[in-house]
Image (cartoon, grey):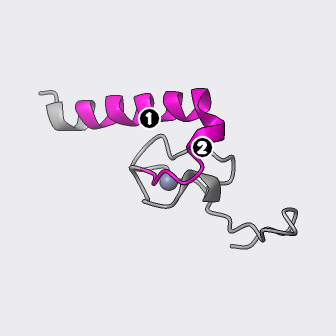
């Protein structure tokens, strides 16, 4: 039996991920649906794509963007 809620959730995450790429410059402060961190804090700048595979969260120093912290 298919879990409709789980499927719908994954569709929503896939769509959010797609839109994040399309509107990359405008969604830096959008909260991720999975971990609630802003898109900009994700390792690749895009929201998590799965509930069971959260991305690494990095906090950028505004003036030293090469410094990454856990
Ligand atoms: Zn996330």
Residue 3 visible: no
Displayed quadrant of residue 57:
bottom right
- Which image quarter holds the C terminus? bottom right
Residue 12 in the magenta stretch? The answer is yes
Percent across and percent down for residue 56 are 62, 59
Q: Which residue is mark 1?
A: 16
Percent across and percent down for residue 53 are 49, 49
Name above or below for residue 30 compared with residue 16.
below
Query: Element at badge 1?
Result: helix
Which residue is at the front of the view, 7 or 37? 37
Circle nearer the N terminus (1, 2) = 1
**CB contact under 8 Å: marks 1 and 2:** no
Query: Element at badge 2?
Result: loop
Percent across and percent down for residue 63 are 85, 69
Displayed quadrant of residue 61:
bottom right
User: Residue at point 24% right, 37% down?
Assistant: 6
Residue 22 visible: yes
Q: Which residue is mark 2?
A: 46
């Amino acid at each position: 039996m298919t879990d409709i809620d789980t499927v719908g959730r994954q569709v929503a995450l896939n769509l959010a991920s797609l839109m994040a790429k399309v509107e990359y410059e405008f969604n830096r402060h959008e909260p991720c649906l999975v971990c609630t961190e802003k898109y900009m804090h994700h390792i690749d700048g895009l929201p998590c794509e799965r509930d069971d595979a959260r991305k690494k969260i990095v906090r950028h120093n505004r003036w030293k963007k090469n410094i990454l912290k856990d």
